[in-house]
């Protein structure tokens, strides 16, 4: 069976990339990561990819804007670079850049995004901190994470999978953040499987409480 070809986009440490690599090595994800892209040169995820023998691409927005080019031109140019690899799926795993149609229309229903909040809650940046603050104010009882198909509207695409993440009264922000990341690592693998057509039942589980 031909392995699915995946491109992973990152902006940071790449812990979700590591979760995907572990699932591939363990036989839980029959796929191959063929390229890792980062828009930040210092992202440790690039080192993770290189250690795993995966080709990397550093593609920053700054030089495009400095040269007078638009975000749309940046998106289109990056889409052209990735298209050469003919990926079956593009996984945004901590990628801190919002794509518009110039990118997304090149890969219809082949771009998925991980976000540390449940559908309709805390779209955009600092979602974990905003959820923790809302819990402290008594506005929510739990949060969660989701993976969805990427659309131009931030964190609003069709849901693939989600997982509830409890917040305990004794949690510090660090405690909650750790639990969230543990859930993300599980969910990114399951959602990637689903997006590749390897699993059809929606994943909506609650994470276990971490002591």
Image: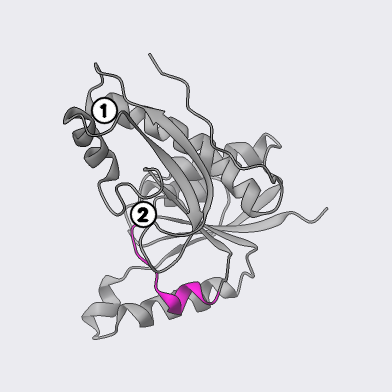
Near-viewer residue (134 or 1): 134
Label 2 Cα crowd, 10 Å radius (few <14 / some 14-19 / many 20+): many
Taking the view exactly as shown, the residue that stands out farthest to the left is 137
Q: Which mark is residue 174?
A: 1
| Disc 2 target residue | 11
Q: Which mark is residue 110?
A: none
Q: Nearer the viewer, mark 2 or mark 1?
A: 1
Distance (Cα) linking label 2 and label 1 = 20 Å
Q: Please name the residue shown 65% across and 63% down the image.
A: 88
Instruction: Give left or right: position of 50 versus 196.
Output: left
Decide whether residue 97 is among the magenta residues.
yes
Secondary structure under the numbered disc 1 in the rendered image: helix
Instruction: Give left or right: position of 90 versus 152.
Output: right
Instruction: Give left or right: position of 200 versus 110.
Output: right
What is the x, y in percent for residue 86? 64, 70
Q: Quadrant of residue 20?
A: top right
What is the x, y in percent for residue 112? 51, 57
- What secondary structure is the stretch in magenta mostly built from? loop
What is the x, y in percent for residue 103? 46, 74
Taking the view exactly as shown, the residue that stands out farthest to the front is 139
Near-viewer residue (114 or 94): 114
Return the disc, 2 or 1, that comes first in the chain's sequence: 2
Instruction: Tell me which segment is drawn in magenta.
Output: 96-106
Taking the view exactly as shown, the residue that stands out farthest to the top is 211
The C terminus appears in which quarter of the rendering? top left
Near-viewer residue (56 or 127): 127
Near-viewer residue (24 or 152): 152
Decide whether residue 32 is among the magenta residues.
no
Q: Please name the residue shown 46% across and 38% down the image.
A: 184
Secondary structure under the numbered disc 2 in the rendered image: loop
Q: Please name the residue shown 16% across and 31% down the image.
A: 137
Q: Please name the residue shown 29% across and 85% down the image.
A: 69
């Amino acid at each position: 069976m031909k392995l699915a070809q995946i491109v992973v986009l990152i902006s940071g440490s790449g812990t979700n990339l590591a979760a995907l690599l572990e699932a591939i090595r363990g036989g839980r994800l029959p796929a191959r990561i063929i390229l890792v892209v980062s828009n930040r040169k210092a992202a440790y995820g690039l080192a993770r990819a290189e250690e795993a023998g995966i080709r990397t691409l550093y593609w920053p927005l700054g030089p495009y804007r400095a040269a007078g080019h638009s975000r749309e031109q940046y998106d289109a140019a990056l889409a052209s670079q990735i298209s050469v690899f003919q990926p079956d799926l593009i996984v945004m795993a901590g990628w801190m850049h919002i794509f518009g149609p110039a990118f997304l229309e090149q890969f219809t229903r082949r771009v998925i995004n991980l976000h540390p909040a449940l559908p309709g809650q805390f779209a955009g940046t600092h979602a974990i901190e905003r959820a923790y603050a809302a819990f402290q104010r008594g506005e929510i009882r739990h949060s969660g994470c989701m993976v969805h198909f990427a659309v131009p509207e931030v964190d609003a695409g069709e849901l693939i999978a989600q997982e509830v993440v409890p917040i305990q009264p004794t949690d510090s922000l660090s405690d909650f953040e750790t639990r969230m990341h543990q859930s993300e690592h599980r969910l990114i693998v399951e959602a990637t499987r689903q997006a590749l057509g390897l699993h059809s039942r929606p994943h909506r589980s609650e994470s276990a409480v971490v002591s």
